Image: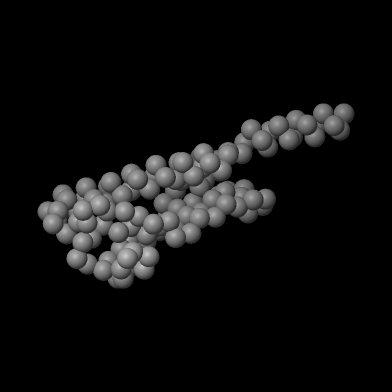
Amino acid sequence: MKPIIFALATLLLIGCSERTDRIEKKLEAYLQEDLKFMVAETMKAGSRDALLDTPYYRVKDFRLFSGAEAEIYSAYAEVDYFIYKDMALHEKRKYRYDVSARHWDRYYKVLFFGADSLKN
């Protein structure tokens, strides 16, 4: 009887978890949408000339959680967005992956002065 219960519990856990590559693909799509929205809002405000020719983002931190840490949120990402041409200004956003809803949630965003430290 115990092996059957163990097997069912294992199948349940496997069915409830989501593959890492799928979580990362969802993040990529979410980040692209955020970038498009930021650019559209800037253009709507009449600041088209202030935009970079190719606005971009850089993932600064990405973590996957496991065990008890992953019961509510199974992943974390910190992302810097660079959209302005002549201003050393970027927006930092933080995201977490909600296990039960199976989607990314943005919970923090703030503007910072400073250029992209990795840009040549």
- Could you tell me which residue is drawn at 30 percent across and 63 percent down? 90
Q: Position of residue 2 (x, y in %)?
A: 86, 33
Across and down, in percent, residue 40 comes to 21, 47
Residue at the far bottom: name it. 113
Q: Quadrant of the N terminus?
A: top right
Residue nearest the observer in this picture, 92 or 59: 59
In terms of image quadrants, where is residue 88?
bottom left
Q: Quadrant of residue 82?
A: bottom left
Does residue 52 appear left or right of residue 29 in this picture? Answer: left
Residue drawn at x 17%, y 51% as measured from the top left: 43
Could you tell me which residue is drawn at 44 percent across and 48 percent down? 105
Q: What is the tally of numbered marks visible in this picture?
A: 0
- Asked whether the viewer can see residue 34, the reply is yes
Task: Give coordinates of residue 59: x percent, y percent.
Answer: 43, 56
Q: Toward the viewer: 105 or 56?
A: 56
Q: Is residue 107 left or right of residue 8?
A: left
- Residue at the image point whose x is 60% and y is 52% from the top: 65
User: In the figure, 44 relative to 109: above or below?
Assistant: above
Q: Could you say where residue 86 lies in the image, as x and y percent from the top left? A: 19, 65
- The colour scheme used here is one colour
Q: Is 44 placed left or right of 36 in the picture?
A: left
Image quarter of the C terminus: bottom left
- Residue, far front: 120
Q: Is residue 94 visible?
A: no
